[in-house]
Image (cartoon, rainbow, N blue to C red):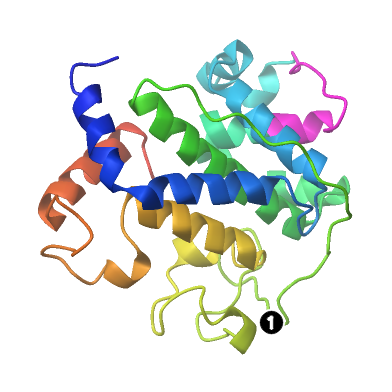
Amino acid sequence: MTADAPLLLSALDNRADIQSAIEAHLDYLSEPGYWWTASEKIAIAAESRLAKHCRLCDEKKAALSRRSVQAQHAPSLILDEKIIDMIHQIITDQGRITRAQVDALEKDGLSKLAYVELVGLVVCIFSIDEFHRALDLAPPPLPQPKPGVPSQSQPPSLEQSTGFVPMIPKLGLTVANEDLWPTGFGANVVRALSATPDLVRQWKRIAGAFYLHLEEMGNLVQANSRVLNRLQMELIAGRVSAINRCFY
């Protein structure tokens, strides 16, 4: 544990929203999703944890072309080999995910809507796990799956003029989804998961606890819910983004 960890852990005593967001997402994992069963969702989360320490991923990332590395990840009883490889790439080498890859997955039977849900699940559990890692804590245990089948529901209006996957248009929110982003906002980084609205809600809650709520983004001075001012927060966020080579 780092020297600052006890101070950070003490500060968390006043942040019940963080634990609430984590618990809510773990509960969400235990339920059937849009295109994945509960068992598959939990397997996706478990596989994303393996990717962080995967030697094969290190080899693939170092290679000029990922395809030049013929070795395969350890098989899963639940997930297809190509799904496993994509989960690992989202964690370790997301900058080289191409439209052709996403299109190829669709040809192999994984719809783009199911891919959106996959990305959302990986992003959320990875955020939770990295938060724990930063505090030198073990990641929370994954839940047991509940029975049921995926809903296969989708928003009524989706378009694909931006990015690799269908999204709700900026001005295309319906009454059922009007909580996804503030009026006039609709940034691509938020809309990216909008084909599976509940994943946007999950991501928003986690991001709101770990960083800032979307509704507070316009406050460039000091959010009422934070001790750090916005300049301090963005200095940290910018440095972390640079280290992670984040596109945004």
> Percent position (x, y) of residue 24?
56, 51
Q: Main secondary structure of the magenta part?
A: loop
Residue at 33% x, 72% y is: 215
> In this rendering, is residue 154 above or below 6?
below
Picture quadrant where residue 46 is located: top right
Which one is nearer the viewer's eye here, 30 or 64? 30
Which one is nearer the viewer's eye here, 98 or 208? 208
Q: Judge left or right: residue 242 versus residue 161.
A: left
Q: Judge left or right: residue 177 versus residue 239.
A: right
> In this rendering, is residue 11 above or below 152?
above
Picture quadrant where residue 200 is located: bottom right
For badge 1, the amino acid type reads Ser
The region drawn magenta spans 71-86
Question: Does residue 246 belong to the magenta stretch?
Answer: no
Residue at 23% x, 24% y is: 6
Q: Judge left or right: residue 44 versus residue 97.
A: right
> In this rendering, is residue 137 above or below 39?
above
The 10 Å Cα crowd at callout 1, few under 14, some 14 to 19, many 20 or more, is few
> Percent position (x, y) of residue 38?
79, 45
Residue at 84% x, 57% y is: 150
Q: Can residue 119 be seen in this view?
A: no
Question: Does residue 74 belong to the magenta stretch?
Answer: yes
Q: How many marks?
A: 1
Q: Mark 1 points at which residue?
A: 157
Residue at 74% x, 18% y is: 73
Q: Quadrant of the N terminus?
A: top left
> Percent position (x, y) of residue 220?
15, 66
> Percent position (x, y) of residue 88?
63, 29
SS for tag 1? Answer: loop
